[in-house]
Image (cartoon, rainbow, N blue to C red):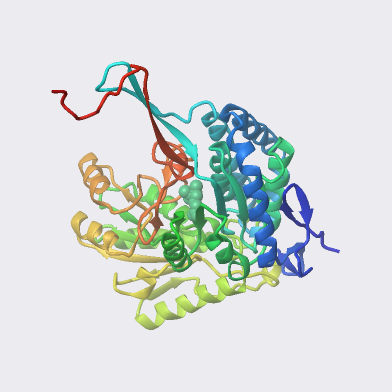
């Protein structure tokens, strides 16, 4: 019997109001059921929001360093459980074990970082234009947050949202993806064990349609942080904007790597393989477009496709696997559909291009690493996010042409250039329209101590993660305080007669 996991509402682990459940399935082997979680209803959401509202005042008034200490304990617990949790990430989401462990490491990094924020949460003190008066700005929490997270980073992305939200003094209702609910439950259990008080962190399982959108629009919710598709994000932003809620969305990408004629080609190939096929292409930062200078195009394509062919497909828990399965049948079918679209559009299929069902892959959602060459920027495979192991190689005439192709996208999350020329890299750094630019590294692998997010359809509202302009901005608001101790009425901007 698969273990039955629960919602956490007001400190109690509960089933859903209608007793229905959702199964979490290993995408590498559909016989392996990881557990079940409640298929929650609107009533469960109502209860969770109420619990979060009730817990808000005491949590808001808990000194921030104390909130940070709880997060620090969570970091220590996550570090202790890293091996177990990393394996669970791989089993539930499919990414190879090294990446499963990396997923947990990203959460650990974020936990240590945000624990420190408890003693920082900096504001400003500035002089007043009047005598015996002081001015300062302080950060205050937003209120109750709805946190809606995806399946591709089942521990890291929830941690990006939960930890800064909590350290800033918000209470939360967390709705993780229904494809990776057990990882989310384990993270919540860890935070509860670390000392997050009852009601401060509530967990409600279920699908976006049933509970996610209802939660985001709930009158008891003050702010929403969402990571997922651009279509859902766009819809949530409209609804939440109209209701006057804070909203931040991290969404899709069509991230380019530019390979210049002076690049170290071996390094660029290695980077493009990791950026394109790491996590089976299921990162919003995945490198799905390789824009290659015409002088090195043939050489690069040849080396890149040979490297792609050498990748070993298989279950992520098996040693030696480079590329795991897609998360579910729908994602697999979407990937296969785009492969057909690419062929019909006249792109040249160099390798891959089909489902893989041999040996240990027979019970999972595997698609071979796929390379299309001769891709024109106008083709759908060069424009639309596939979220699978499909990479389009596009030829460019020069730097200007490459940057124009890179920017000709409705997305703008991450972009990269391989060059050995400092001037070329400076121009690319300035001109690439994306939230993140890498030089001589692929488009994936952002570190947590800097803001994470994109422009155009990739991001909306505040950025995630650390650094100035990161998640602390999302999860707090400014309050400005003027204190007059002159004991007389002083008027700013007004000249005395
Ligand atoms: C995502 O793809 O949804 O920068 C997040 C990276 C990771 C996070 C990716 N640190 O690739």
Residue 444 sits above or below residue 1 on the image: above
Q: Quadrant of residue 333?
A: bottom right
Query: Looking at the image, which is closer to me, 312 or 9?
Result: 9
Query: Looking at the image, which is closer to me, 107 or 8?
Result: 8
How far across and down, in percent of the image, does residue 376 sit?
29, 72
Q: Residue furthest bottom?
A: 344
In the image, taking residue 281 as reference, residue 196 lies left or right, namely right
Q: Is residue 28 visible?
A: no
Q: Across the whole image, how many numbered discs are drawn on residues?
A: 0
How far across and down, in percent of the image, does residue 174 sit?
62, 53
Q: What residue is at 19 percent from the left and 56 percent from the top? A: 400
The N terminus, quarter of image? bottom right
How far across and down, in percent of the image, does residue 154 sit?
61, 53
Query: Looking at the image, which is closer to me, 330 or 478?
Result: 478
How far across and down, in percent of the image, does residue 311 sit?
54, 59
Query: Looking at the image, which is closer to me, 319 or 211?
Result: 211
Q: What residue is at 65 percent from the left and 60 percent from the top? A: 46
The C terminus, quarter of image? top left
In the image, taking residue 154 as reference, residue 168 lies left or right, namely left
Residue 12 sits above or below residue 211 on the image: above
Q: Is residue 8 visible?
A: yes
Q: Residue furthest left?
A: 497
In the image, taking residue 222 as reference, residue 101 lies left or right, namely right
């Amino acid at each position: 019997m698969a273990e039955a996991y629960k919602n956490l509402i007001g400190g109690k682990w509960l089933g859903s109001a209608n007793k229905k459940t959702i199964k979490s399935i290993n995408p590498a082997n559909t016989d392996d059921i990881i557990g079940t979680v409640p298929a929650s209803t609107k009533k469960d959401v109502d209860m969770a929001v109420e619990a979060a509202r009730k817990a808000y005042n005491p949590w808001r008034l808990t000194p921030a360093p104390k909130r940070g200490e709880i997060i620090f304990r969570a970091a220590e617990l996550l570090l202790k459980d890293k091996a177990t949790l990393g394996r669970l990430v791989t089993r539930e989401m499919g990414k190879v074990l090294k990446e499963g462990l990396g997923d947990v490491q990203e959460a650990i990094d974020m936990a240590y970082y945000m624990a420190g924020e408890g003693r920082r949460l900096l504001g400003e003190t500035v002089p007043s234009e009047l005598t015996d008066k002081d001015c300062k700005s302080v950060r205050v929490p937003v209120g109750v947050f709805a946190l809606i997270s995806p399946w591709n980073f089942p521990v890291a992305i929830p941690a990006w949202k939960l930890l800064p939200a909590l350290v800033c003094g918000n209470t939360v209702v967390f709705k993780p993806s229904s494809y990776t609910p057990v990882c989310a439950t384990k993270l919540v259990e860890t935070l509860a064990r670390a000392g997050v008080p009852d009601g401060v962190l509530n967990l409600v399982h279920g699908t976006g349609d049933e509970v996610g959108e209802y939660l985001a629009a709930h009158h008891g919710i003050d702010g929403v942080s969402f990571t997922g598709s651009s279509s859902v994000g766009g819809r949530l932003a409209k609804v939440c904007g109209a209701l006057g809620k804070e909203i931040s969305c991290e969404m899709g990408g069509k991230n380019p790597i530019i390979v210049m004629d002076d690049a170290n080609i071996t390094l660029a190939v290695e980077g493009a393989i990791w950026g394109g096929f790491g996590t089976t292409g299921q990162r919003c930062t995945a490198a799905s477009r390789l824009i290659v200078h015409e002088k090195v195009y043939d050489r690069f394509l040849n080396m890149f496709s040979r490297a792609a062919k050498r990748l070993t497909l298989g279950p992520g828990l098996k040693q030696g696997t480079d590329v795991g399965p897609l998360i579910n049948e729908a994602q697999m079918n979407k990937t296969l559909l785009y492969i057909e679209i690419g062929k019909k559009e006249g792109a040249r299929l160099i390798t891959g291009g089909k489902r893989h069902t041999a040996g240990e892959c027979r019970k999972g959602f595997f698609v071979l690493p796929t390379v299309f060459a001769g891709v024109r920027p106008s083709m759908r495979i060069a424009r639309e996010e596939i979220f699978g192991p499909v990479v389009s190689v596009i030829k460019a005439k020069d730097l200007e042409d490459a940057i124009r192709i890179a920017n000709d996208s409705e997305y703008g999350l991450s972009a990269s250039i391989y060059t050995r020329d400092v001037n070329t890299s400076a121009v690319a750094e300035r001109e690439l329209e994306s939230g993140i630019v890498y030089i001589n590294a692929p488009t994936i692998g952002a570190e947590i101590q800097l803001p994470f997010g994109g422009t155009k359809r990739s991001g909306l509202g505040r950025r995630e993660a650390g650094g100035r302009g990161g998640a602390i901005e999302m999860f707090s608001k400014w309050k400005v305080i003027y204190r007059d101790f002159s004991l007389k009425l002083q008027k700013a901007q007004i000249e005395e007669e």
